[in-house]
Image: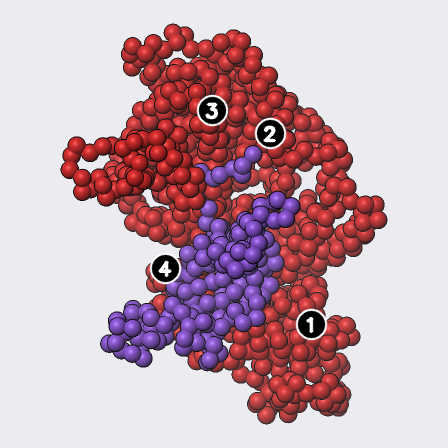
Chain colours: A purple, B red
């Protein structure tokens, strides 16, 4: 019997980005057939997130503090760990974090009840995450922050103004 | 309403063209399969070979355009999911669905999927049950097999829910079956309702505190209206008979009910007196019986709609009737996975001068409330869709039930006139608050209801926001008599809600309460609300959103964005030098010996000063230094605690006064931001540096004073958090005990832990109860002292006693609830139930298998009859 589908979409599903991320990398897939040795199909990518207790939280203001995040996110359950996303060079908050709960259910509830609501007057984004690993707290953009803040054309005072690449290259940005 | 509907219709249209499949929220993931299947179907259509239906082709192609034929399953799915949510007449929709289903009934895949959706729709979207049932009803005219299959599938699920004690699901399935009452032979559903009542009698005579029976009576009473609307007057007698029986149970009052009052019990000002859900239903149905069982709000369908339009496709002349499925009520009855409690009916808007919601004597109040609450609770996984359903509430009830949407309250009576029409926004807000403020505990995490209110405001701001404003004012007015746990839920919601709407609130209307003493519940609320807002934002921002008169309530220090002062920086503070040294030593990760040297120096000086327990000042210095060094963020304080963990553990072991000092120092350092203190205490509890009883002893022994501290919401928060930690753990242990097939040695181990922790929890509750009872009764020494010395006015002392009483109610209730979940009797009852279960507990799938078999026997009987 196939799993029963809901009559409406669920808000506690990982984004396509998160699902794609935990999928087996192509390089490994090539070496290994789609099926395991015993003929079992390899696990669905979402299975890796089926016990996820960690959430990626995005679109935070650079000025949002751990205390604020705690205050909001503990409404879904006790927080086990909070890791602030930092600018790789400056080691200052750069607008994202990882929130780890004790249970998977708390993480799902957070997707349903907190994702898409406001913290510090910004609509925040939550996504299920496979779990924090050292190094992932740093921005991967060229200038140290998140990639999305490199080329932003709109002024966002909560996230350092214009995109950094824009600042740097000014008018030339369109040609790069 | 018209405007709204047009918009929805537009969307529906667009969705169709886009070929998205299920609408009304049926978008997204659930479409994947559909779309694929549809493309496959298209391959059979030579004109559409090149691909999926393209909107572009329709846009640029000149007429005549070839209309893309939607495959039957996709169409049925879309129509069923969206039933009653467009401007189309629901009756036209459901007859069309029934006919289309009849035409395609031979398609086994389609049939199977259609009924899957039907069952799921009943569970997830209770508003639509009468409409979904109407499909099965008209199906009987089109092709009786439709009705047979629908009854069979729903009956199987009903049995499954009954076996598992999933009461909401059971109720909803039964409602569907009740809506087909006119199609059954003999008395139909009433025989089964009678059997259910017999079970109630058995349960109640076996246990006077039984709550499962109450749940069953609620289900019986909520099913009768739907059965009567379908079955008509020939069942009035049966209903009356049943109602006579349920009366005894419904009027019975359980001890627990004394503890779930939303407002202080004996207050004359109470906005709504205590009404038990089943007691109320019983009264309402009795009233309805006297007025001829009209149930005006339940949507109706013309029984002959299909017969009249029937053209050459001759319909069977006399559609068959069916046997009501037989169900087996398990013995013992499975109480279900969640602890059950009696329920109170709560309303903010009922029985007021301007009638915007049904009177509490009107059965519509319960019927509509029940459906709204189930809609909210069954679909917590998509608040966006729930909010849309709630805003569309008027679509799902009789035409003459609600007034036009969004009529302002002050014009309501004028515009509505003499007719009794209700304000749908008020009913929605009323229902959400009834869940947010449900005692002893809400169905879902409170934050769900927060986000649902936020979402509803986003969907229909002009209509919802004014109702919400009235709700807030109504609650604020009654703060002084509201259950204290509910005050804190209201507070938490209010501040969170405002944080989603730029902190906009008309504070000026509360400015007049600022002259009240801080001990007054209203003033205490304002202070606490500002603190909670600041926690989610920052002080300067919040200051900018409130009138100047309120600025003194926000400590000025908070405007500067820096850490609280370190008191040892002031040389006049005793042990200033040592305090500073400790801070340096902590920062530099000095050796244990070096730190000990500083601490010893404090001990020596303290001894010279004649301080009884020198460990107290040294603990103060050490913990304050940890707070100062960790002031930058919670992570910082966490790593500082980690660094000082050994010493803190040793302190906690050696002196009761010193371990309470740990709490005291944290709270003192963070006195302007008590939220941070509450978090740090929480961390210390997790590290087991602090024991729960230590926190409670500090609160009631050291901090409470004459009871003034009971007015501070963060104190309540700290105690409630501490208690919650203990009860959560106990429940986990109880769950561990209730695993099936636990080896004997583990049973003993778990039992021992449970016994020990249960006692600890009782000790904790006892301590709290005794402490607040002293204040409540005015027996507390310090309260007597302060009042007789004139330090506290008689008025203030009475305010404090009132706080004491409300604290007392909350913690007596919490203690009782825990007894009913993890107490010896409760756990033993569950163990007996576990033992009574069949050896190999059937998997969910097999349960359905069993159910189906049973239903199939019935259906076969039906087949013969056909």
Q: If you read the primary sequence from the N terminus, does the residue marked by circle 2 or circle 4 appear first?
A: 4
Q: Chain of mark 1?
A: B
Disc 4 chain ID: B
- Give the structural element (helix, strand or loop) at label 4: loop
Query: If the image is split into quadrants, where does the N terminus of chain B sit?
Result: top left
Determine the residue positioned at 49% across, 62% down.
A56
Which residue in the protein does label 2 denote? B848
User: To which residue does mark 4 refer?
Assistant: B501
Does residue B523 appear in this view? no
Q: State if disc 3 and disc 2 touch (CB < 8 Å).
A: no
In the displayed orientation, state which residue is furthest to the left. Answer: B62
Chain ID, mark 3: B
**Which callout, 2 or 3, points at the residue further toward the start of the chain?**
3
Of labels 1 and 4, the one closer to you: 4
Is any part of residue B388 visible from this angle? yes
Q: Residue B660 shows which numbered tag?
A: 1
Q: Secondary structure at mark 1?
A: helix
Mark 4 burial class by Cα count in 10 Å: few <14, some 14-19, many 20+: some
Q: Residue at x 83, y 45 (%)?
A: B744
Quarter where residue B832 is shown:
top right
**Above or below, B539 relative to B380:** below
Marks 3/1: CA–CA distance: 71 Å
Q: In percent of the image, x 15 and y 37: which residue is there?
A: B62
Helix, strand or loop status at disc 2 = helix
Which mark, by number, is residue B108?
3
B748 lies left or right of B103 = right
């Amino acid at each position: 019997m196939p799993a029963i589908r809901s009559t409406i979409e669920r808000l506690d599903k990982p984004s396509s980005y998160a699902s794609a991320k935990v999928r087996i990398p192509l390089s490994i897939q090539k070496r290994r057939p789609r099926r395991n040795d015993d003929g079992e199909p390899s696990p669905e990518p979402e299975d890796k997130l089926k016990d996820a207790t960690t959430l990626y939280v995005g679109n935070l203001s650079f000025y949002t503090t751990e205390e604020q995040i705690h205050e909001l996110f503990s409404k879904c359950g006790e927080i086990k760990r909070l890791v602030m996303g930092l600018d790789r060079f400056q080691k200052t908050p750069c607008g994202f974090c990882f929130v780890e709960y004790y249970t998977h259910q708390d993480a799902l509830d957070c997707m349903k009840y907190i994702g898409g609501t406001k913290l510090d007057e910004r609509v925040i984004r939550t996504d299920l995450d496979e779990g924090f690993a050292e190094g992932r707290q740093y921005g991967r953009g060229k200038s140290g922050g998140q990639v999305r803040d490199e080329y932003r054309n709109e002024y966002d005072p909560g996230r350092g103004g214009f995109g950094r690449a824009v600042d740097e290259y000014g008018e030339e940005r369109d040609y790069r | 309403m018209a405007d709204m509907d047009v918009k929805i219709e537009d969307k529906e249209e667009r969705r169709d063209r886009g070929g998205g499949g299920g609408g009304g929220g049926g978008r997204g993931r659930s479409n994947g399969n559909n779309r694929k299947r549809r493309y496959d179907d298209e391959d059979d259509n030579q004109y559409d070979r090149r691909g999926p239906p393209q909107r572009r082709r329709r846009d640029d192609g000149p007429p005549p355009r070839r209309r893309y034929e939607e495959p039957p399953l996709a169409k049925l799915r879309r129509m069923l999911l969206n039933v009653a949510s467009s401007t189309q007449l629901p009756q036209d929709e459901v007859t069309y669905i029934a006919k289309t289903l009849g035409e395609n009934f031979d398609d086994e895949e389609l049939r199977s999927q259609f009924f899957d959706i039907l069952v799921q729709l009943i569970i997830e979207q209770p508003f639509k049950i009468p409409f979904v049932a109407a499909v099965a009803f008209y199906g009987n005219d089109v092709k009786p097999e439709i009705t047979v299959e629908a009854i069979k599938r729903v009956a199987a699920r009903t049995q499954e829910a009954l076996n598992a004690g999933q009461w909401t699901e059971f109720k909803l399935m039964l409602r569907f079956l009740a809506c087909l009452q006119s199609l059954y032979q003999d008395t139909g559903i009433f025989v089964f309702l009678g059997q259910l009542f017999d079970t109630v009698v058995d349960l109640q005579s076996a246990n006077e505190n039984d709550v499962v029976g109450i749940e069953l009576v609620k289900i019986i009473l909520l099913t009768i209206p739907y059965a009567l609307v379908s079955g008509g007057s020939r069942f009035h007698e049966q209903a009356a008979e049943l109602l006579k029986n349920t009366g005894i149970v419904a009027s019975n009052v359980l001890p627990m009910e004394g503890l779930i009052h939303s407002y202080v019990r004996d207050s004359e000002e109470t906005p709504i007196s205590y009404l038990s859900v089943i007691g109320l239903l019983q009264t309402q149905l009795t009233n309805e019986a006297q007025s001829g069982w009209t149930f005006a709000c339940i949507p109706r369908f013309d029984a002959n709609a299909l017969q009249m339009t029937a053209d050459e496709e001759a319909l069977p002349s006399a559609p068959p009737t069916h046997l009501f499925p037989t169900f087996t009520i398990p013995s013992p009855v499975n109480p279900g996975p969640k602890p059950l409690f009696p329920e109170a009916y709560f309303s903010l808007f009922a029985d007021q001068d301007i009638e915007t919601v049904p009177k509490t004597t009107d059965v519509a109040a319960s019927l509509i409330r029940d459906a709204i609450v189930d809609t909210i609770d069954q679909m917590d996984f998509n608040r966006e869709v729930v909010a849309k359903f709630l805003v569309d509430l008027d679509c799902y009830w009789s035409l003459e039930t609600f007034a036009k949407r969004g009529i302002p309250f002050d014009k309501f009576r004028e515009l509505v006139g003499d007719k009794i029409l209700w304000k749908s926004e008020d009913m929605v807000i009323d229902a959400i608050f009834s869940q947010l403020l449900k005692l002893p505990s809400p169905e879902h995490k409170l934050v769900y209801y927060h986000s649902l209110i936020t979402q509803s405001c986003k969907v229909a701001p002009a209509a919802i926001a004014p109702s919400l404003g009235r709700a807030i004012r109504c609650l604020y007015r009654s703060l002084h008599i509201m259950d204290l746990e509910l005050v804190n839920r209201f507070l938490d919601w209010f501040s969170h809600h405002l944080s989603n709407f730029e902190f906009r609130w008309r504070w000026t209307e509360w400015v007049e309460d600022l002259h009240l003493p801080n001990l007054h519940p209203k003033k205490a609320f304002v202070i606490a609300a500002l603190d909670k807002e600041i926690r989610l934002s920052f002080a300067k921002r919040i200051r900018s959103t409130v009138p100047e008169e309120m600025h003194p309530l926000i400590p000025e220090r908070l405007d500067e964005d820096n850490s609280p002062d370190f008191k040892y920086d002031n040389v006049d503070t005793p042990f200033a030098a040592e305090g500073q040294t400790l801070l340096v030593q902590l920062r530099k990760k000095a050796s244990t010996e070096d730190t000990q040297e500083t601490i010893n120096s404090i001990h020596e000086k303290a001894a010279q000063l004649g301080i009884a327990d020198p460990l107290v000042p040294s603990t103060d210095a050490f913990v304050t230094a940890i707070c100062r060094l960790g002031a930058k963020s919670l992570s910082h304080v966490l790593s500082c605690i980690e660094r000082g963990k050994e010493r803190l553990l040793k302190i906690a072991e050696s002196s009761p006064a010193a371990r309470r000092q740990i709490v005291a120092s944290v709270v003192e350092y963070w006195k302007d931001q008590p939220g941070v203190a509450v978090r740090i205490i929480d961390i210390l509890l997790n590290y087991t540096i602090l024991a729960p009883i230590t926190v409670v002893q500090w609160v009631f022994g050291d901090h409470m004073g004459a009871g003034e501290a009971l007015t501070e919401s963060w104190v309540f928060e700290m105690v409630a958090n501490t208690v919650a930690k203990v009860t959560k753990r106990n429940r986990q242990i109880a769950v561990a005990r209730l695993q099936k097939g636990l080896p004997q040695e583990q049973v003993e181990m778990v039992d021992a832990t449970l016994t020990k922790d249960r006692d600890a929890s009782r000790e904790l509750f006892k301590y709290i109860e005794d402490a607040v009872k002293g204040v409540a009764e005015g027996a507390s020494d310090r309260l007597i002292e302060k009042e007789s010395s004139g330090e506290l006015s008689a008025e203030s002392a009475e305010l404090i006693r009132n706080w004491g009483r409300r604290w007392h109610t909350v913690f007596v209730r919490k203690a009782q609830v825990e007894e009913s979940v993890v107490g010896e009797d409760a756990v033993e009852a569950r163990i007996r139930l576990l033992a009574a279960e069949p050896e190999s507990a059937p998997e969910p799938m097999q349960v359905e298998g069993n159910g189906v078999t049973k239903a199939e026997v019935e259906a076969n009987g039906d087949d013969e009859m056909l």
